[in-house]
Amino acid sequence: DSGVTQTPKHLITATGQRVTLRCSPRSGDLSVYWYQQSLDQGLQFLIQYYNGEERAKGNILERFSAQQFPDLHSELNLSSLELGDSALYFCASSVGLAGFLEQYFGPGTRLTVT
Amino acid sequence: AQTVTQSQPEMSVQEAETVTLSCTYDTSESDYYLFWYKQPPSRQMILVIRQEAYKQQNATENRFSVNFQKAAKSFSLKISDSQLGDAAMYFCAYRSFPQGGSEKLVFGKGTKLTVNP
């Protein structure tokens, strides 16, 4: 158990819908990262937050957005869902920014768009 | 942009034998970190081993060791005395040094390792 929690574990929804994925980082971790794992694209970085502020953006679609709240939990919002958005979405957390910092991964949320 | 390449989509090994998984990467940065992650059927991402680019000594964690060749931009993982529980997808990953850029991980496509009893 990495200490990172993600809810829900599984999500099945229809095209055009909107969903919210939630992540709680390990206690004390200030950085949260979101990754998408799909069969065709592999594991891709989406976005990083550090202590409530957006730190870095990767290949995140405009239909996707994220935020990190004062209690440091993070949410990833996916809207106007398409079949191609079906994937495993991971959240990871780390303590901060300086020095070597391991990223601890949550168990992931499996999103299926039908 | 950094890229990570794993040229072996699948590998197999006999239980108790040794196997080496290959990884090459491309970067213009001089300081960075490299990782191997394991993803068993449970889908959990588990850190296996890490290497700081500024360290010449190859990292070792029990039965897992790496061969880091900085000039060749190569980072292979050796698993000794393979066990059935080692069967998983293995991902090589790159991360910039904190001051150099984002802390994001850049992953290879993965190598599926099968361990035969």
Image (cartoon, coloured by chain):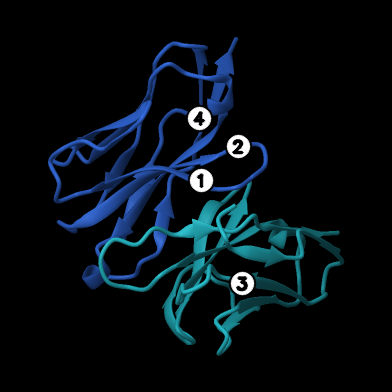
Please tell me in which quadrant of the rendered image residue A67 appears.
bottom right
The quadrant of the image that shows the C terminus of chain A is: bottom right
The answer to whether the residues at label 2 and label 1 have Cβ atoms under 8 Å apart is yes
Q: Earlier in the sequence, mark 1 or mark 4?
A: 4
Farthest front residue in view: A27
Circles 1, 4 touching at the beta carbon (< 8 Å): no
In contact (CB < 8 Å): disc 4 and disc 3: no
Choose the circle earlier in sequence order: 2 or 4.
4
Spatial distance from mark 2 to mark 4, Cα to Cα? 15 Å
Q: Which residue is mark 2?
A: B40
Dot 2 or dot 1: first in sequence order is 2
The residue beneath circle 1 is: B46
Mark 3: secondary structure:
strand
Residue underneath mark 3? A24
Q: Residues within 10 Å of mark 4 (few under 14, many from 20)?
A: few
Does label 3 lie on the same chain as label 1? no
- Residue B21 makes an appearance in the image: no
Label 2 crowd bin: few (<14), some (14–19), many (20+), radius 10 Å: some
Do the numbered discs 2 and 4 sit on residues whose CB atoms are within 8 Å? no
Q: Which residue is mark 4?
A: B9
Q: Secondary structure at mark 1?
A: strand
Q: Is residue B17 above or below residue A67?
A: above
Which residue type does callout 1 highlight? Ile
